[in-house]
Image (cartoon, rainbow, N blue to C red):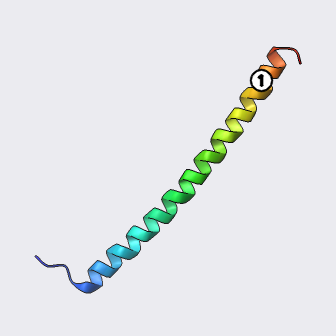
Amino acid sequence: MEIDDKTKFKIEELSIEISQEAGKIEAHLRKMSELTADMVSIIDDYDSGT
């Protein structure tokens, strides 16, 4: 079964949108990781009495 051009175009559009959303998720996860590292550092400083 052959896919028509309109369907191919829609699939391509959705694929691009998925990639863009994945990039946003990756950026959010990176930021969450940085914030978590900051929290751990603060807790470590507190635990060591500095």
Q: Using residue 2 as the reference point, say whether residue 15 is left or right of it.
A: right
Given the image, on which type of amino acid does mark 1 rest? Ile
| Quarter location, residue 48 | top right
Question: What residue do we see at 58% from left, 46% from top?
Answer: 29
Disc 1 secondary structure class: helix
Question: What residue do we see at 19% from left, 79% from top?
Answer: 3
Q: Using residue 34 as the reference point, say whether residue 10 is left or right of it.
A: left
Placement of 40 over or under 26, stated as above or below? above
Q: Quadrant of the C terminus?
A: top right
Furthest residue to the left? 1
Placement of 42 over or under 10, stated as above or below? above
To which residue does mark 1 refer? 43
Placement of 42 over or under 11, stated as above or below? above
Q: Using residue 28 as the reference point, say whether residue 23 is left or right of it.
A: left
Q: Using residue 27 as the reference point, say whether residue 35 is left or right of it.
A: right
Question: What residue do we see at 34% from left, 78% from top?
Answer: 10
| Quarter location, residue 6 | bottom left
Spot occupied by residue 7 in the image (x, y as percentages of width and height): 27, 80
